[in-house]
Image (spheres, rainbow, N blue to C red):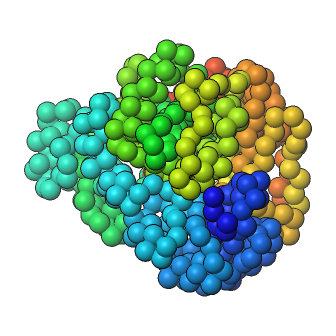
Amino acid sequence: MFKKILIANRGDVAIRVLRACREMGIKTVAVHSVVDSSLMHVKFADESVCIGGNRSAESYLNISAILSAAEITGADAIHPGVGFLSENEKFATMVAGHNMTFIGPSPEHLRMMGDKIVAKKTMSELGIPVVTGSDGEVKSVEEAKSIAAQSGYPVLFKAASGGGGKGMKVANSQDEIENAYKMAKAEAKANFGDDCVYMERYLSHPRHIEIQILADAYGNVVHLGERDCSIQRNHQKLLEESPSAALSKTQREQIGEIVTNAVKKLGYVGVGTLEFLYEDGKFFFMEMNTRLQVEHSVSEEITGIDLVKEQIRVAAGEKLNIKQEDVNFFGHAIEFRINAEDSLTFMPSPGRIEELYFPGGNGVRIDSHIYRDYVIPPYYDSLIAKIIVHASTRDECLAKARGALDELVIEGVSTTAELHKKLLCNKDIIAGDFDIHWLENNLQTLTKGEIS
Ligand code: ADP
């Protein structure tokens, strides 16, 4: 097992990884930007190193500074957390080149899944159902028009190197193709330095359902069921739950088996998530995330499995000691992302936390790095807390969540908490009757101008 892990991240996920290390008796090194020197993961870690300026490029994406910090402190592994360098093939290769372990999959798998066109092709060959669309890159407006003429409208252009919902544009008719294609290409180039785009049939009422997997280096793969992440804005998740109200036990077992078989054939090692759209009883693969995900906590709550500890164990070459039949699902869990954002416009709302009180009690888990008087910097992701609620049934979970969100006090900045409270009183949410477009279609009615 590793002796010392450097955590190349910040915020709640840095603390999450740090907690797992502490439980495993592994020493930790925190890295941070100048503005983050007073963050809790820096205080809790055994050692800390300031790796650069406030912009991510100067610090959390600064490969040479992170590698130097790891060498100076004698770390034998690096945990990349979520976002930043977690899916960066070059970083993973360089970590290995410095005789340290990258806690994540191989550079080869990062490359394969990092290109969504290659990912879809690979998964399709491994027996996973995919969304229909172009056969690889769409090279011209004419090609786009001819593909759409065959598949029918609407269609969606997506960036091959995409992420975070960027570089996606819908075309509802032939007239909209040229504009959507050009805009998707420009956005892809600006965000990912790669203007390669591909096309998919745009599904009108799908749910976003993803399957969590865990794999070791000896061909053992288990799945931890699904998470329903259909409540989204700007193609970004806001609330995640497990199990999904849309799936039966049989459907869960079927898709779980298809996914574990494919991952086994792929030879993938680590934690990972296969993201699907689910419409009219059918699954359509979109992409694989080759890292821990923000919403991993939901699966941890209903299975009792600590995904971060397991991730560290398999990275250290240990065998999985969980078999599929050992994975049991208990009750229902929902995660509420509390972002420092305006509830209606979703514009970031950085600033000082004037007052703070977190809810608690049985089945209420808080993953957060903020504290009273903490000043949220404008440089990073707006996620400031995750409230994860676990109960025996979905209805009990919703009731518990209402109480937890009522207890929550965050003053000084706008957050998404107010929106979550409204969601919890909505009949469609209570009935579990929604798709990925639901929030955008219902936002105005839901908030009725009350939230600013
Ligand atoms: P990213 O990596 O940028 O998050 P994804 O491929 O995971 O991109 O898609 C993000 C979200 O965009 C999905 O959860 C879904 O809401 C929407 N989306 C993606 N592909 C389609 C599609 N073919 N039809 C309808 N919605 C889609």
Determine if residue 62 is in view.
no
Q: Is residue 191 left or right of residue 319?
A: left
Nearer to the camera, 327 or 400: 327
Q: Vertical placement of 49 versus 125: above or below?
A: below
| Quadrant of the image occupied by residue 298 | top right
Q: Vertical placement of 345 versus 188: above or below?
A: above
Q: Which x, y percent locates residue 56?
A: 55, 75
| Quadrant of the image occupied by residue 287 | top left
Q: Residue at x 72, y 78 (%)?
A: 48
Q: Residue at x 54, y 59 (%)?
A: 103
Q: Residue at x 69, y 72 (%)?
A: 29
Q: Which x, y percent locates residue 299?
A: 63, 36
Q: Vertical placement of 54 versus 206: above or below?
A: below
Q: Is residue 56 left or right of residue 177?
A: right
Q: Quadrant of ligand 1?
A: top left
| Quadrant of the image occupied by residue 17 | bottom right
Q: Which x, y percent locates residue 319?
A: 55, 43
